[in-house]
Image (cartoon, rainbow, N blue to C red):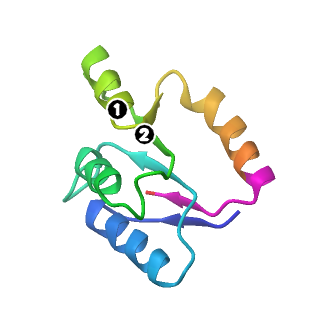
Amino acid sequence: MEAVKAHGGRAAIQQLCEACVEGKPFDVMILDIHMPDIDGWEVLSAVKANPLWRHMPVIAVTGQANGASDVTRLSNQGALYVDKATDFVNFMPKMVERILQAGAPVAAL
């Protein structure tokens, strides 16, 4: 597994672009909703609007979801929601293990 970390939404989108130009697009994205400059909501919208990225699975991680409406919003955009406070410790190791088994490059944004 190759993990790539971006510091903010603009950097995340830039790295997605660079990966496509290099012919090595990411297979999955772990996306924090609360980021500097462009937040995760905007990054998720950009990902799902781009035909090169729209089918990439997105795991949206946040500790500040505003209830069922945010979870529904993520689901409607095709993202899997992971709550940092309750799910992160239990869920992420299993997800990373599955990603490693598949040999997929990972974008940690």
Query: Can you say whether 39 is above or below 88 in the image?
Result: below
What is the x, y in percent for residue 67?
28, 16
Query: Can you say whether 82 is above or below 26 in the image?
Result: above
- 2 or 1: mark nearer the eye: 1
Q: Is residue 91 left or right of residue 6?
A: right
On the question of residue 35 being in view, the answer is: yes
Q: Please say if the residues under marks 2 and 1 sit with CB atoms less than 8 Å apart.
A: yes
Q: Element under label 2? A: strand
What amino acid is labelled 2 in the image? Ala
Q: Is residue 91 left or right of residue 78?
A: right
Magenta highlight on residue 106: yes
Q: Earlier in the sequence, mark 2 or mark 1?
A: 2
Q: Residue furthest left?
A: 37
What is the x, y in percent for residue 28?
55, 53
What amino acid is labelled 1 in the image? Leu
State the residue in front, 81 or 64. Answer: 81
What is the x, y in percent for residue 108?
50, 57
Q: Which residue is mark 2?
A: 60
For the point 34% across and 73% down, which residue is it?
14
Distance, label 2 to label 1, CA atoms, is: 8 Å
Q: Is residue 48 left or right of residue 21?
A: left
Q: Which residue is mark 1?
A: 74
Q: Element under label 1? A: helix
State the residue in front, 39 or 63. Answer: 39
Q: Residue furthest bottom?
A: 22
Structural crowding at the residue carrying mark 1, measured as other residues with C-alpha within 10 Å and reported as few (<14), some (14–19) or many (≥20): many
- Magenta segment: 100-108
For the point 28% across and 28% down, which residue is it?
73
Q: Quadrant of residue 77?
A: top left
